[in-house]
Each structure stands twice: as structure tokens, then as C-alpha cells.
Image (tube, rainbow, N blue to C red):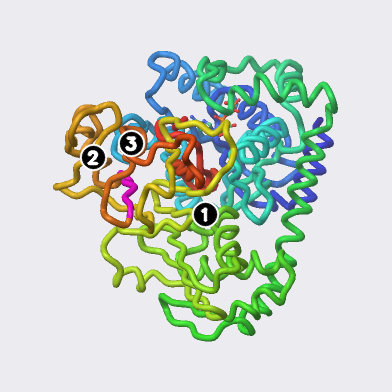
């Protein structure tokens, strides 16, 4: 096991002489093993080792015991120990994110602070090969793959420093064995056993089957990651060279390109060119630069219809006028606030949700909380998606007369700020067809007379933190892990 780790550290040049490695230790087996490993090998690498521990104040006395355990271990070996208490619950409520994500964001924020205060330092975490497999599987399941590798990177930038993961080439089992041999008796986090979190379901149900098929799956996935990154770097450098040849006009907030010039290059370069443009306009880590958005833009450019629009968010806009395509957020200012035309087929993204429309002849398609099925010929096109207005009323199915949309929100106890962002589907006459998850109109029902069956689906976009796959979209408004 030790040899594997040394090989991995050298291959990825994770550690350099005279550095201080700040080991992020939860008290669990992975980070305790990492601490023991780096501490015992500190002379070999000519490094200083210290420890940081975050007290999340989430698991009552269990968390107090974790902190005491790590501190006592460090005192026993004279390892410098840093600890910080963070208010996860308050932060999660303020940011409207899950506690797991809130804990992670606060942890990484402090890691970043430590990197700026401790000179020549790096943070090391205990992520291992099984974590790698789980992460990649989860991203594949959610469909949130970026263009580059989608696993945990062996090293990446964090604030002004680097975070490294020396254990990615070994398994959890090897770590447990190492702990035993080194007489380390780590703490076990009871929430790791819970089936509540998607990761734990992947860990407990899917991973064992894959490992039974091939115990080296973590190595194969790690290799896949590394190759994907090499390919991506190469393709990105090519895309950088091609970019000026497709641009017609560029300003701080707009990019205009030639569609034909884009479509003349191979598809992997097309994807990266769009990625470069979106990153230029909206920032490298913007959730608008994911494979899903890129796919949508390419779909718009490849359609038979010579013109069309795509709304990637409330303020981000792509428009095709024959061969000239505009990427802009300034253009949106001229459009009526928060009103979007939903093409059929088509999809609209905002920072919070995705609405998707298509025609189907599948008789199995049914309505669900996040899906409505309508007779297209009974409504006036175009379909419009917009936020609510005070005078909005809907002719709810199963009810007489009309009901105020505001009342629907109140009845379902939807909080005020969510109401403002809730998508509402309206037809060309301004008739409300659907308030996703709440009510549909009693009009435009599908029946034997229906020739064109329209399906509209609404997805809530998950909010996530840095490098957790901030691009993921999940099906279901309330399904946030
Ligand atoms: N409370 C914490 N304080 C410091 N570092 C932490 C803390 N929680 C997690 N980490 C770091 O992040 C890594 C991954 O976190 P995760 O919660 O996935 O841990 P884990 O797989 O249960 O690992 P461990 O066995 O080390 O707890 C850990 O190995 C550790 O390096």
C-alpha cells in the first residue's frame, strides 16, 4: 500500500521538499491513515506536517469526541493542531443549501484561509480510490459530466494554494488494514451509514457489486480521469487556436460567431469552443458552462429552423439568426422581464430550474408533479414561461371557476422568495396552463381527439459548491440531498 501511495505522489508531483502539508483530519479512518502516513514519511519527503480539524457542530457529543480524539492524537506526537468551529446549520439556512454541502463549503473556506496564513503549504485530504469511483458514478447517474475528467482531481487549486489527495490510488480496505497495522483506532461517523444521502446509497449498494466484478476498478477509473484530462488539455489548446477564426465580433458582454465556421470543425472542438465562449462571458466555473448547456447550444445551431433563441439563465441568452449566432447577457435587458418563449421541442434554463417541452406519441407518458401532458391543438402558441404576476388566476382541474395563483402558493406553504422564482407556463393568450408541482389547467386535456401530445417537464437545478459538480441537474423540485 505504501509503495502505491509513493508512486502516486511522485507521478502527480503532489509534494515538494520544504513544504508544510496541512492534513485535513476528521478523525475517521481515511484522514487518520493519511496523517499517520505523511507523519511517518515526513523525513523522506523533507516536509513539515500539521493538522487541521473542523468542528461542524452537527452531531452533538459525537463531534466533540471526534475533535478531542484528533487533538489528543496530535498532542501525543507533537503535531501542530488547528481547529475551527463552524455554524453549519445557520450557513445552510442562509444559503438555502443542504447541511452536507454547507459543511463542505465552510470547511474549504477555512482550508483556503489556512493556505494563505501558513507559508509554502498544501492541504491534504483523505479521499481514496473508492471515493473516486463513487464520485464518478454519481456524476454519471446525474448526467452532470463536464468536458474534462469528472472524478476527484489528485491536486487542484484552492484559494492561493493547492489541495492534494495522495490516497486516490488505494482502496478503503487498504486504508482500514493500514490503520490496524499502525494501531490507529479511528472514529466512525454514524451519518456515513445513513441511506439518506445519494453517496451512501452508491457506496453501500452499487460499489460492492462493481468491486466484486473487478477489485481494481478504482485504478481503471483513475486512469480514465487522467486520460480524459490529457485529452481535454490538448483539445482546449486547439480550441484556443481555432476560436479567433469563428468570432465575428467580441465585446465584454457579447460574442458573435459564424455558425458555419463553428460547424466546420470536429464536434469535440465545437463543444470546447462553446465552453470557451461561455466561460469568457460568465466565468470559468459558471454553472452555465456544463455539458448540458453546451449540448443545448449545439442543438440550437444544428436545427433545421434558421433562427431561434435559447435562454441559459435569467440573464444569459444565445440567439441564432441564420449563420450569425450571438451569445449575450446584455440582450436580455430588452426582453420583458423574466418572460421566455419555450420552443417545442425546447428547453429553458434559469439559475434555479429547467423547463423542457417536446411532442410525444408515447401512450405511456403520464402526468406527474413535475410533468404535464397537454393537447397542443387546444392551446395557442407560443408557450411562455414567466414568473408570477399579482393578477394571475388559473382554471384548476377538478375545481369550478378560477383560483388565484398566489393562493396556491399560500395553501402549499411555499416561502415568499421561492414564489418569485417559480416558473409558470402560459399560452400565447396569456392563459395559465401549469404551475409546476401545484396545479394544471382543466383545459387542453389529452383525449382520443388529441393529435399532438405536448409534454412539459420541470426540473429543479441543484445548488452546489466549488468543484462538487456544480453543473448537476436533478429531476424533482424537492429532491435535494
Ligand atoms: N471535520 C473535518 N475536519 C477536517 N477535515 C475533514 C473533516 N471532514 C472531512 N475532512 C477531510 O475531507 C476528506 C473527505 O471527507 P469525507 O467526509 O468524505 O470523509 P470520509 O470519507 O468519511 O473520510 P474520513 O475517514 O477521513 O472521515 C476527509 O478524508 C478529510 O481529509
Residue, far left: 391
- Residue on which disc 3 sits: 440
Give yes or no for contact between labels 1 and 3 (Cβ–Cβ under 8 Å).
no
**Residue 197 in the image: above or below residue 230:** above
Mark 1 residue CB less than 8 A from any atom of ligand 1: no
If the image is split into quadrants, where does the N terminus sit?
A: top right
Q: In which quarter of the image is ligand 1?
A: top right
Q: What element carries label 2?
A: strand
The residue at 34%/47% (across/down) is 425
Residue 253 placement (x, y as % from top left) = 41, 75
Q: In which quarter of the image is residue 91?
A: top left
Query: For the residues marked 1 and 3, what is the alpha-carbon distance in whole angstroms?
Result: 20 Å
Which is nearer the N-term, disc 2 or disc 3? 2
Q: Residues within 10 Å of mark 3 (few under 14, many from 20)?
A: many
**Residue 431 in the image: above or below residue 172:** below
The residue at 32%/39% (across/down) is 443
Which is nearer the N-term, disc 1 or disc 3? 1
Q: Is residue 315 visible?
A: yes
Q: Quadrant of residue 35?
A: top right
* Dot label at residue 394: 2
The residue at 67%/39% (across/down) is 136
Query: For the residues marked 2 and 1, what is the alpha-carbon distance in whole angstroms?
Result: 24 Å
> Camera-side residue: 91 or 236?
236
- Residue on which disc 1 sits: 345
Q: Quadrant of residue 205?
A: top right
Give yes or no for contact between labels 2 and 1 (Cβ–Cβ under 8 Å).
no
Residue 193 placement (x, y as % from top left) = 56, 16
Amino acid at each position: 500500500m505504501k509503495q502505491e501511495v509513493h508512486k502516486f505522489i511522485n507521478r502527480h508531483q503532489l509534494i515538494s521538499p520544504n513544504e508544510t502539508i496541512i492534513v485535513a483530519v476528521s478523525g475517521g479512518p481515511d484522514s487518520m491513515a493519511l496523517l499517520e502516513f505523511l507523519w511517518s514519511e515526513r523525513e523522506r519527503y523533507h516536509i513539515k506536517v500539521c493538522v487541521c480539524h473542523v468542528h461542524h457542530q452537527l452531531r452533538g457529543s459525537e463531534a466533540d469526541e471526534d475533535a478531542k480524539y484528533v487533538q489528543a492524537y496530535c498532542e501525543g506526537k507533537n503535531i501542530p493542531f488547528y481547529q475551527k468551529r463552524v455554524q453549519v446549520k445557520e450557513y445552510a439556512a442562509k444559503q438555502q443549501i443542504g447541511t452536507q454541502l454547507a459543511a463542505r463549503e465552510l470547511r474549504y473556506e477555512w482550508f483556503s484561509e489556512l493556505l494563505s496564513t501558513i507559508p509554502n503549504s498544501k492541504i491534504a485530504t483523505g479521499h481514496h480510490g473508492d471515493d473516486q469511483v463513487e464520485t464518478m458514478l454519481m456524476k454519471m447517474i446525474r448526467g452532470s459530466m463536464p468536458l474534462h475528467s469528472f472524478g476527484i482531481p489528485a491536486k487542484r487549486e484552492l484559494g492561493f494554494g493547492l489541495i492534494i489527495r495522495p490516497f486516490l490510488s488505494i482502496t478503503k480496505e487498504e486504508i482500514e488494514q493500514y490503520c490496524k497495522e499502525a494501531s490507529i483506532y479511528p472514529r466512525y461517523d454514524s451519518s456515513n451509514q445513513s441511506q439518506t444521502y445519494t453517496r451512501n446509497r452508491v457506496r453501500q449498494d452499487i460499489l460492492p457489486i462493481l468491486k466484486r466484478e473487478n477489485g481494481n476498478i478504482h485504478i481503471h477509473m483513475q486512469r480514465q480521469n487522467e486520460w480524459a484530462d490529457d485529452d481535454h488539455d490538448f483539445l482546449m489548446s486547439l480550441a484556443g487556436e481555432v476560436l479567433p477564426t469563428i468570432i465575428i465580433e467580441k465585446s465584454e458582454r457579447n460574442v458573435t460567431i459564424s455558425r458555419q465556421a463553428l460547424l466546420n470543425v470536429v464536434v469535440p472542438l465545437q463543444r470546447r469552443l462553446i465552453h470557451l465562449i461561455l466561460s469568457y462571458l460568465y466565468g470559468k466555473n459558471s454553472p452555465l458552462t456544463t455539458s448540458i448547456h453546451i449540448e443545448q447550444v449545439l442543438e440550437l445551431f444544428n436545427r433545421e429552423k434558421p433562427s431561434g433563441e435559447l435562454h441559459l439563465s435569467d440573464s444569459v441568452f444565445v440567439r441564432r439568426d441564420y449563420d450569425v449566432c450571438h451569445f449575450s447577457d446584455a440582450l436580455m435587458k430588452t426582453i420583458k422581464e423574466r418572460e421566455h418563449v419555450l420552443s417545442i421541442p425546447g428547453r429553458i434554463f434559469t439559475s434555479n430550474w429547467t423547463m423542457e417541452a417536446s411532442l410525444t406519441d408515447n401512450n405511456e407518458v403520464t402526468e406527474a408533479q413535475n410533468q404535464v401532458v397537454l393537447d397542443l391543438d387546444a392551446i395557442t402558441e407560443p408557450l411562455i414561461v414567466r414568473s408570477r404576476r399579482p393578477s394571475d388566476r388559473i382554471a384548476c382541474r377538478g375545481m369550478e371557476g378560477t383560483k388565484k395563483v398566489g393562493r396556491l402558493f399560500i395553501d402549499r406553504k411555499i416561502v415568499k422568495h421561492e414564489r418569485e422564482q417559480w416558473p409558470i407556463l402560459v399560452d400565447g393568450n396569456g392563459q395559465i396552463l401549469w404551475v409546476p408541482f401545484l396545479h394544471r389547467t382543466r383545459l387542453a386535456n389529452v383525449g382520443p381527439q388529441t393529435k399532438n401530445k405536448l409534454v412539459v417537464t420541470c426540473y429543479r437545478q441543484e445548488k452546489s459548491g466549488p468543484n462538487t459538480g456544480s453543473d448537476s441537474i436533478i429531476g424533482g423540485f424537492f429532491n435535494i440531498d
